[in-house]
Amino acid sequence: TTPVATSVFETLESEVRSYCRGWPTVFESARGCHLHDEDGHAYLDFFAGAGSLNYGHNNPVLKRALLDYLERDGVTHGLDTHTVAKREFLETFQRTILAPRGLDHKVMFPGPTGTNAVEAALKLARKVKGREAIVSFTNAFHGMSLGSLAVTGNAFKRAGAGVPLVHGTPMPFDNYLDGKVEDFLWFERLLRDPGSGLNRPAAVIVETVQGEGGINVARAEWLRALAELCRRWDMLLIVDDVQMGCGRTGAFFSFEEAGIVPDVVVLSKSISGYGLPMALTLFRPELDVWEPGEHNGTFRGNNPAFVTATAALETYWADGGTEEQTLARGRQVEEALREIVAEHRRRGAEYRGRGLAWGLTFTDRGHAARICSRAFELGLLVETSGPESEVVKLLPPLTATPEELDEGLRVLARAVDETV
Ligand code: PMP
């Protein structure tokens, strides 16, 4: 039965938003991988704000940095002015992330959300190339504003708003997961065909692992072929690293493993490290065609987020180590998923993922939702993803200990055993 505490939300929420997550409780406090509700129940959080809490809830180092900043009356809202917090973030991002990777990309603060960062990337690509079409992929998720929605490969999310896909033709890569490099031959035929409606696109936008789309992992070889195709056809390559960036797949950027350098990179979610709204659009310096004031917004400079972001970069990325640890933790998750899948092979169980982003799915597409609700009852927070919510998505904080992972994975195995 639904606890009484949620009823007030049920009344109010029908007016203010379109849905609420299927967790019938009221959360009160959180630390690391753990969330507590107001009735004193504890939950292990393997959802981590859809990848926006890679360093856990209320990470103590980040919290200290934030409290110190507030104590000394640091600027909280600076609009787009220069502030010390912003400068320190930019210097730290340059030193810990861009320079060691040989990247000379410029950093733009497009607004508070991933959607804002995607929108700026699309606008920039169209302006630079003077062309309109943008190619995106089936099951892609890029945001909820009309532009970012227009490259979101999910008809349900687009249809009600009457937003067509901006590439104007069905993408050839229906099965992204098994996408073959040869698929690009077909794509090139479309590009060459004046009647295809595809024309010369300004850009291609891609997630290296589709998060909302169901943890669909693009192979490194496929990403390299895509980058090469973009080069040949003079299209910008935009990597949307909103969910898979900031170390989720191991390396800081999810595209590093493939050895490609996108023209534009979009980051948000875990960049502030503390769940504070912050987003970046990174682009090659020669793409900086913005006129002053051409793209702005009130909440471009969230100074408390700069402070926690700087602390997160110093703590987790200045000396390396985070990548290896994530990959090791990922192997632990993979091992547990392999066992679950072996037990439930008859039900068509499958798993996939990279780093600490994993998905588990079954022939019966309804299993995922049932597993997530049973996991909730057993004290584990996991969400579904995929076009039919058919994938159980695991995004534990990168800072989860092996013991915490083990505990959560045992709960997951039990939820699966009791459900499918
Ligand atoms: N791109 C990707 C890959 C995402 O996963 C998301 C959010 N789930 C977004 C963009 C949009 O980000 P936001 O919700 O912060 O607008």
Image (spheres, grey):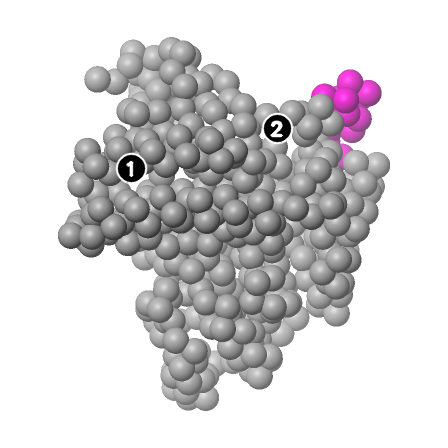
Distance from mark 1 CB to nearest ligand 1 atom below 8 Å: no
As drawn, is 59 to the left or to the right of 220? right
Residue 256 visible in the current orientation: yes
Along the viewing direction, whichever of 416 and 248 lies nearer the viewer = 416
Q: Position of residue 354 (x, y in %)?
A: 46, 54
Question: Range of the magenta residues?
Answer: 66-81
Pointer 2 with pointer 1, Cβ within 8 A:
no
Name the side, left or right, on which 1 lies relative to 87.
left
Q: Is residue 141 visible?
A: no
Up-down relation of residue 419 to residue 164 (above or below): above
Instruction: Give me the residue at 64% from left, 38% from top.
Output: 272
Identify the mark at residue 273; answer none if there is no mark.
none
**Other-residue count near label 2 (Cα within 10 Å), few / some / many at <14 / 14–19 / ≥20:** many
Name the amino acid type tagged 2: Asn
- Reading the image, the residue beneath label 1 is 413
Does the magenta-highlighted stretch encompass residue 72?
yes
Kind of residue sitting beneath label 1: Ala
Q: Residue at x 79, y 51 (%)?
A: 95
Disc 2 under 8 Å from ligand 1? The reply is no
Q: Is residue 351 found inside the magenta-colored segment of the image?
A: no
Residue with the mark numbered 2: 59
User: Hey, which quadrant is residue 307 in on the image?
Assistant: top right
Q: Tag 1's secondary structure?
A: helix
Residue 26: percent from left, percent from top: 39, 18
Instruction: Name the residue: 49% across, 35% down.
Output: 402
